[in-house]
Image: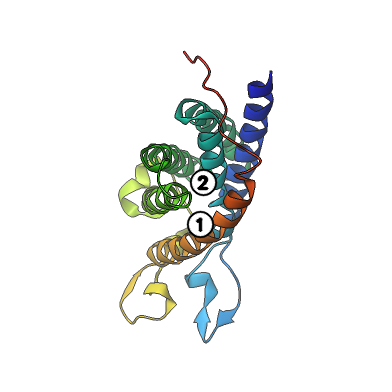
Amino acid sequence: MLYSRYTFAYVLLMTLVVVASNILVQYPLSGTFFGIALGDLLTWGAFTYPIAFLITDLTNRQFGPSIARRVVLAGFVVGVTLSFWTSIPRIAVASGTAYLIGQLLDISVFNRLRRQSWWRAPLAGSMLGSVLDTALFFSIAFAATFAFVGPNDAFAIESAPILGIFSTEAPRWVSWALGDLSVKVIVGIVMLLPYGALMSTLKPMPPVKTL
C-alpha cells in the first residue's frame, strides 16, 4: 500500500511536468536581454522539464531502478496521451520519445553511481539525460528530416543567429535547443538542492518483488 501511494504521487507529479513542458515549449520567451532576442534563445519549457529528472532520481533513490522505470513508463503513457490533447501531435511524439529515452538513461547512470558521493548520481544522470533528451526532442519536433512525423509551425525552421548572438545562422530550433539545454543544465544543478534536502526524508526502502 505504501509503495502504491508513493508511486501514484510520483506518477502524478511526472505527468504534470511532462504535460506542462509540452505546452510551454511551444512558447518562446519575449523581450530582449543585452540586445539578444530571447525568443531566438529560449522557450518556457526549459524551466519546467528538468524537474522530471528530480522526480526520477528521487524515485530511484527511494525504491530502486525497477520502480523508477515503472514511474517513467506510467508518466510516459499518461503524459503523452494528454499531450495529444494539449499540443500538436508532432510535439507530443517528440516529447514522448525524448522523455522516455532520456529518463531511462538517467535511471541507468544514477544506478551506476548511486554508491558514490550523494550529488554525483543525480547530477550525472540529469546532465546526460538532458543532453540526449534535448537533441531528440528538438530534432524530432522541428527538423525538416522528421517532417514525416507531422507538420509544425513554420517559424520554427526560420533562420536565426545561433544563440541569438553568433553571426552564423541556423534554423531557429537549433538556437532554441542550445538555449534550452543551457537552462536545463543550470536548473539541473539547482535541483540538487531539493534532492539533498529530501535525502533524509525519502530514504531507500527495502526492495520489493517486481515482475
Element under label 1?
A: helix
Element under label 2?
A: helix
The answer to whether residue 163 is seen in the rendering is: yes
**26 or 4: which is nearer to us?**
4
**80 or 51: which is nearer to us?**
51
Tell me if label 1 and label 2 are in contact, CB under 8 Å: yes
Q: Residue at x 40, y 65 (%)?
A: 178
Q: Quadrant of residue 104?
A: top left
Amino acid type at circle 1 is Gly
Q: Residues within 10 Å of mark 1 (few under 14, many from 20)?
A: many
Q: Residue at x 43, y 77 (%)?
A: 164
Q: Residues within 10 Å of mark 2 (few under 14, many from 20)?
A: many
Q: Identify the disc placed on residue 188.
A: 1
Q: Identify the disc placed on residue 169.
A: none
The answer to whether residue 191 is seen in the rendering is: no
Q: Which badge, 1 or 2, comes first in the chain's sequence?
A: 2
Task: Tell me if 137 is positioned left or right of 8 in this view.
Answer: left
In the picture shown, does residue 74 fall above or below 156? Answer: above
Query: Which residue ends up furthest to the bottom in the rendered image?
Result: 34
Amino acid type at circle 2 is Phe
Q: Residue at x 52, y 78 (%)?
A: 37
Residue 91 on image: x %, y %? 49, 46
Question: CA gap, disc 1 to disc 2?
Answer: 8 Å
Residue 65 on image: x %, y %? 45, 30
Residue 80 on image: x %, y %? 54, 35
State the quadrant of the N terminus. top right
Residue 205 on image: x %, y %? 57, 28
In the picture shown, does residue 36 fall above or below 172? Answer: below
Q: Residue at x 50, y 14 (%)?
A: 209
Scheme of colours in the image: rainbow
Give the residue pinned by disc 2: 53
In the picture shown, does residue 62 fall above or below 191? Answer: above
